[in-house]
Amino acid sequence: MVLLGCSDLLLRRGSRDLLRVSSLEVREGWRVGLVGPNGSGKSTLLTALAGRLVPAEGRVVRPPGVEIVFVTQAAAVASSATLWELARGEMWGLDALAQELERARVRAGRPDDPAAGLRYAELLSNFEQRGGFSSESRLASGLTRVGLPEESWSLSAAEVSVGERRRARLVGALCAEADVLLLDEPSDHLDLEGRSWLAERIAAQSGAVVIASHDRGLLDRVCTHVARIEAGHLRLRRGSYSQVTSLEEGEARGERRRQKVRTKRLEELERLAAELATFGHRGAQARRRRAERERTALETQATLPSGRPRPARRQERGERAPAAARAGRSGAVLRASHLRAEGVFDDVGLELRAAQRVAVLGRSGSGKSTLLALIAGARESDDPRSALEWRDGTSLLYLDQEERGLDPHSSARAALEAWASPARAAGALAAAGVPPDAWDRPAESLSGGERARAALALLEVREADVLVLDEPTNGLDLPAIEALEERLRDSPATILLVTHDEALLRALGAEVWALEGNALVPYRGGLDGYRRGARRLEEDATRLSEALASREAQGEAAHPSAPEALEVLDAERAAAEQALLDPTRVSGRARERWRARRQAAESALLEAWEASARPPAPRFQVRESGVPVLADREGEGLTVRLEGGPGLRVRRVGVVAHLVPMAPGEGEPERSTLPWAWRALCHGAARLAVYLLPVEAVQVASRDVLDGGPFEAFGDGWWVARREALERSEGWQRHARRRRRQCR
């Protein structure tokens, strides 16, 4: 089903044509990544699709009743609204449906409106499919996952940052389960945990999603299609971002080969035309005219069908040869000790080796930027014992989030010319995409994107031994991020960076250190190890690693609940408990570290025990057509399923129970259900509902005939099972009458 589309669309910025879209359709289940350079019209297109901008030409079409939720990069909000109210406000469609459902419930109780019950059942099914009953729990969980703890939900918009307000609105929009979700740079202001939650929620959307983003990790994880804006036109392709990019690079290579053949042929035709021009006879002139027509045709093929020039060649990954490592430069380049920032972290120490690549991760506000500033010497440590021991002759380049390594009162050109010739500085600024009119302006007057590109140019001309980079991808579009990735991947320098760009971390193969529990904790296995929680637990971690490696060498599964793993984790927890028994024997900072180690060991033990435990068996069971029908309580209702087969939920509304099939993906893979299995499931669910819930009737919508049991056809595909009919079919009422006769 097409949920949103446009045709012959023209968007303008002032008097300039910005973007032309000949045709675009967004269908149910599609997740479209909208990519393109900064200023190409991504946000403008989303605004037009949301109906908040009238295009200069063309029209945007959406079917009646389609609900669209749009999360912009910036939006005016009431300063008195709390974070919870901001998030809840994005769920206006679900709230409107809840109000309509309540009105339908009241009408269904009137005997003079027989159709009201069916309308109520339809609205109830829609409300359940959109997760209306669990919306607030999903909202609370989402706010926590994006770094907004419960104590912040009551804060007003005026008391929190722009990033926190935007995160709250994003969570509300993703929990609204709207038909179409439009997201403009949704991963901004999110750490890795928040981005993982974002990818999970986008992938779970049943409608359509259009995402304008420079986050390649997010685009790869969720997108089914990619719409690229290039030279004022939009092109839609099926596939993830990596798949579409690979296809486009293959097409570009083919076009370069064809262009090479055309160029060679044009040169031959030029020579032929020049030679034939010296001859005056008719045959020579005819051949010259044919050569000129062929040359004109070849020149025409050098442009796209739309007449716009072909995009410049993109440098392919791996094409640039890696720079050779500096001879004789190995070992430690930095040893830092007793780094401390009051209220952020205490007594952090670290060592960086030559050519090492380390990413510092952690939740927002954990102190990552502060740590980089201490290491770069841009901030003084609060501990007088702190020390930074650099290897002699080591050069450092520090690019922070705000100034990007530039002097606020000096120009970008001057910053580069301090390290390179004027010609090379100008070439680097041009290659990085810095506008020429920004080269000589003070850095403080540049936009965030211009400063980010100037920093990219500075990174190109500086050959530092150590690069300390704080969120280097902020403000860059996708081509610039890929250029940054290539530069860092080929650099022989030691790299210490803070970033939430998953694709960049994987491309660099960076180690992961995380700021947790007032300490800097290294992880094994890079980004994947960090997500698994594979902390380095010093001696105990070494023992655990050796034990698991031994099992793998013997061909056994290295399961976290293996006896060796449980023994090591229990020993780690016991050691932490012993250290914390006498608080007078350890300092305050050491106590914090021991508490963090105890918490990590306890969490790992709980996960191991849970992995080894058997899942609980269902509490109730009946048999229908010889097949077990299993059930468990779920709030005021039930979950019912055939053993190894499909399932449904039993929702109680007053004295009536509704049978609602489980949506595909709720615990079971999507499968086809045979009529006899569906009939057995409904019959068993009706019996369980009457026995376990205080209801007088059970109703279900079914295309299959539910004969041979308590159900009666109610019309329009609806079937109703009444308590009285079920008791009669099972003999309960007959036995009751017999007992009454015996009593008389």
Image (cartoon, rainbow, N blue to C red):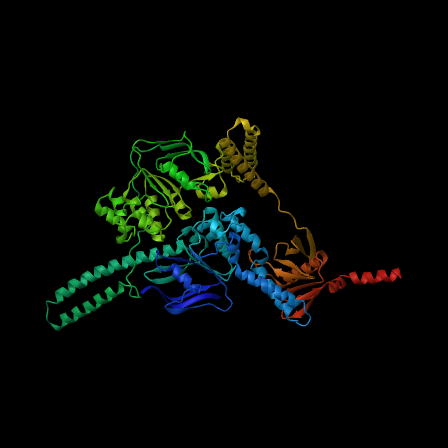
Label total for image: 0
What residue is drawn where x is 25% and y is 49%? 440
Return the x and y of residue 569 as percentages of the image width and height.
55, 35
In the displayed structure, 648 sits above or below 592; it is: below
Residue situated in front as seen by the camera: 98 or 700: 98
Q: In this view, does 645 lie to the left or right of 185?
A: right
In the displayed structure, 455 sits above or below 639; it is: above
Q: In this view, does 589 lie to the left or right of 637?
A: left
In the displayed structure, 210 sits above or below 284; it is: above
Q: Quadrant of the C terminus?
A: bottom right
Hey, which quadrant is residue 270 in on the image? bottom left
Return the x and y of residue 25 as percentages of the image width and height.
43, 65
Q: Is residue 236 left or right of residue 415?
A: right
What residue is drawn where x is 41% and y is 48%? 501
Residue situated in front as seen by the camera: 24 or 289: 24
The answer to whether any part of residue 700 appears in the image is yes
Q: Most extreme residue toward the right, as rendered?
A: 744
Hey, which quadrant is residue 573 in on the image? top right
Return the x and y of residue 68 as percentages of the image width and height.
48, 62
Return the x and y of residue 69 as percentages of the image width and height.
48, 60
What residue is drawn where x is 36% and y is 53%? 478
The answer to whether any part of residue 703 appears in the image is no
